[in-house]
Image: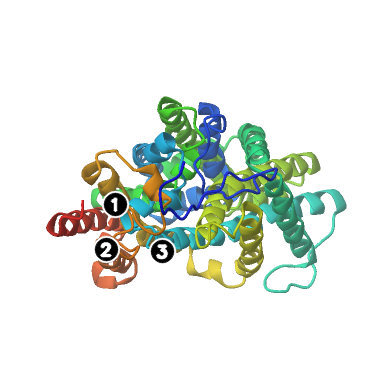
Amino acid sequence: METKNMKVQYPNGEGAHGTENPLRPVTKEEKSWGWFAIFNIWANDIQSLFGYSLVASLFISYGVSGWTAFAALITAGLMVMLLVNLSGAAGERYGIPYPVLARASMGTAGAKLPAILRATVAVFWYGVQVYFASTALALLIRSVTGITAGTEILGLDSVDWVSFLIVWAFHIFIFWHGMSWVETFLNIAGPFVYAVMIGLVIVLWNKSEGQLLSQAQTIFANPEGTWASEVKGFIAIIGTMVAYFAAVMINFSDFSRYARDKNTMIKGNLAGLPFNMILFSALALLTTAGAAVVYGEKIINPTEIVGRTDSVVLGVIAAITFFAATVGINLVANFVPAVNGIANLSPSKISFRKAGMITSVFALIIGGLWTSFISQFGISGFVNTLGATLAPLYGIMIVDYYVLRKHELKLDDLYNMEGGTYHFGNGWNNNALVAFGIAAVFSVATVWVPILGQLSGYAWIIGAILGGVIYYVRCKKSHIV
């Protein structure tokens, strides 16, 4: 695949286990993911320890009944399903990752901006998830050895730090063997999480002497809530959950390009999002309610709940399972976009493994700082800010691909870094940059500026729509498409 005077940015790549340039289009043989692989992306994403903590906190923090929170979570799952079907279509059709798809709207050079923003978010989440996975390993070590906490450094004791470094090294071991190992690990890890969570509910049911359901019903009832507060909370929860998935919605083509065909992608998303959201949310509610009865407080970290059960067997099984689930989704949802974004800075020089090591070094720093500094800002505000920042990129990408380009891209030109349709004269599409800047500032302001606080639940939607509309208007006026 060559074009005259084209500066090729995707060599065929000869090295084993993914050492080639990760930005090249995947081959027909590499499009091997069935619907179950797509399903497990969402299963593990929702099942991760951070995902559990977020879902559990939503039942507690927004002052709404459990029924309202549950309905909002299901609605958010359906919305995300529709949005990723839109963003993943181009990746599935052309076999390209997000940094390459972004060149169509942002320019061959300008695409480095959204790619590195997405990579920055991915690297951050990667570090945070390494920390959360390490808490599962720390639970395993304490369950088996009985070691108690010692002196803390940056919020972590010696067992925590040893666990963190082991998990960090384990991630490197997996990605070093390429995407086939990542997919296999993901497919094995996903289904076991539900078994452990159901087991945890059973243990709490027995310890609560039958009071678990009544406590759950209390959470569902919320007699102090008004109609207005329920609606406000409903919208806020949807906004937070959509923002939680915002990063994956942007770069879903990184995964959809491995799907066998479009129907496989759609089927995997349909089975993966609404189903997992319903089941996981129900289990999170019951577990949180059970912990409130047994331990007298609402605990949102499942490893802490398991640690208090005093069951060595359950502790070992739960630790291994949560560890596997968190590592699995971390490798796919965070590692892959981070690697692709970093590689896009210099596609001819940064390989899959080199980008992976860069990602790992930053993750080591970020994960170590999570408990001592970053987590103090609060989960919901943190998630909403990241989502609001990325939202305009989604709107710009969708308008560009569906409205302006009518689903048609020139594959050769996407890899032509010196000219072609997507070079826009100097490699930057100024219309997209202006649209992103204006929309991002406003959507982030809805999260943090008090006078705009009423719009905070709509931060992602506002950013996406505003970015897309401004981009469309500017492109039509300049006749750029």
- Image position of 25 (left or right of 310): left
Callout 2: SS = helix
The first of marks 1 and 2 along the sequence is: 1
Dot 1 and dot 2 residues touching (CB under 8 Å): yes
- State whether residue 196 is above or below residue 165: above
Image x and y of residue 422, in percent: 32, 54
Dot 1 and dot 3 residues touching (CB under 8 Å): no
Mark number displayed over residue 113:
3
Q: Residues within 10 Å of mark 3 (few under 14, many from 20)?
A: some
261 or 415, which lies in front? 415
For residue 194, what is the image quadrant?
top right
Mark number displayed over residue 439:
2
Mark number displayed over residue 395:
1
Name the kind of residue labelled 1 in the image: Gly
What is the CA distance from the residue labelled 3 to the residue labelled 2? 15 Å
Image x and y of residue 375, in percent: 55, 66
Image x and y of residue 174, in percent: 71, 46
Name the kind of residue labelled 2 in the image: Ala
Residue at 61% in and 58% down: 355
Name the kind of residue labelled 3 in the image: Leu
Callout 3: SS = helix
349 or 353, which lies in front? 349
What is the CA distance from the residue labelled 1 to the residue labelled 3? 15 Å
Residue at 67% in and 70% down: 155
The first of marks 3 and 2 along the sequence is: 3
